[in-house]
Amino acid sequence: MRGDGQHEATRRTFLRASILTGAAFALPGCLGEDDGGTEGERGVRRSGDRGAPADARLPATPACDDGDAAGPTAAQAEGPFFTPDSPRRTRLREPGVAGVPLLLAGRVLYTDCRPVPGALLDFWQADGSGEYDNTGFRLRGHQLSAPDGRFRLETVVPGEYATRTPHIHLKVQARDLPPLATQLYLPGEPANQRDGLFDPALLVRARPAGAGLRAAFDVVLATG
Ligand SMILES: [Fe+2]
């Protein structure tokens, strides 16, 4: 699935401006699968969890609301499954896509906690069965952060695959700032402790919501 012409024009305009400022995304690489994330206020169990220990002992996600400067979000390898030119959309959860519903929301911020408007966020992930769509754009999409830095993604909880704990890949590009590639993790996942790429700093804050989860994560961009 591709975005419509207007969306593609918006993306091209953004990328052109980024290139002019020397800050375009790197070309997709073929690195080994990897990850990253931020921690939740509490561990969350969802349908299908197998007695997962809560990650309550993990440190809380740094917050900008307390007036402290936040450190930049940790970078992680992009992994082998990025596909460029995904459609512009905030809803990745479509009929027939396997997985528990997940609403992920947050902000893109500078390290001094000011919002970053118009940042390009590109998401991609496996479905609830741990399967990537490497021929189409299922569970892939990009969006621009709002004037207040906010973003919102309707998706599903990704499944485990191979040695990887559930994770959502994310690339963020803002004008005049270095690009960030990272991965977000879910609290309470048993495989978090077995995945050598897991980073508790990249755990989302999550809580049950109806038949699914609501999660939050603020992306803090390094200024250089
Ligand atoms: Fe992955």
Image (cartoon, helix red, strand yellow):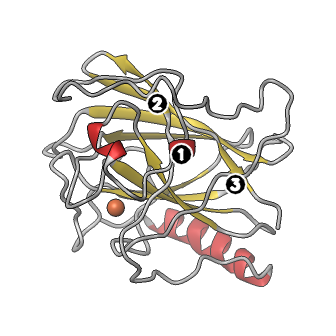
Q: Name which of mark 3 and mark 2 comes first in the sequence.
A: 3
Q: Mark 2: few, some, or many residues within 10 Å (few <14, many ≥20)?
A: many
Q: Mark 3: few, some, or many residues within 10 Å (few <14, many ≥20)?
A: many
Residue at disc 2, secondary structure? strand
Q: Looking at the picture, how far across and down is residue 52, in whole percent?
A: 27, 28
Q: Looking at the picture, how far across and down is residue 24, in whole percent?
A: 66, 78
Q: Amino acid at mark 2?
A: Ala
Gap between marks 1 and 2, in whole Å?
12 Å
- Residue indicated by mark 1: 202
Q: Amino acid at mark 1?
A: Leu
Q: Vertically, is 65 above or below 137?
A: above
Gap between marks 3 and 2, in whole Å?
21 Å
Q: Name which of mark 3 and mark 1 comes first in the sequence.
A: 3
Q: Amino acid at mark 3?
A: Gly
- Residue indicated by mark 3: 118
* Ligand 1 location (quadrant): bottom left
Residue found at x 51% / y 42%: 200
Q: Observer-nearest residue: 147 or 198?
A: 198
Q: Nearer the viewer, mark 1 or mark 2?
A: 1
Q: Vertically, is 138 above or below 175?
A: above
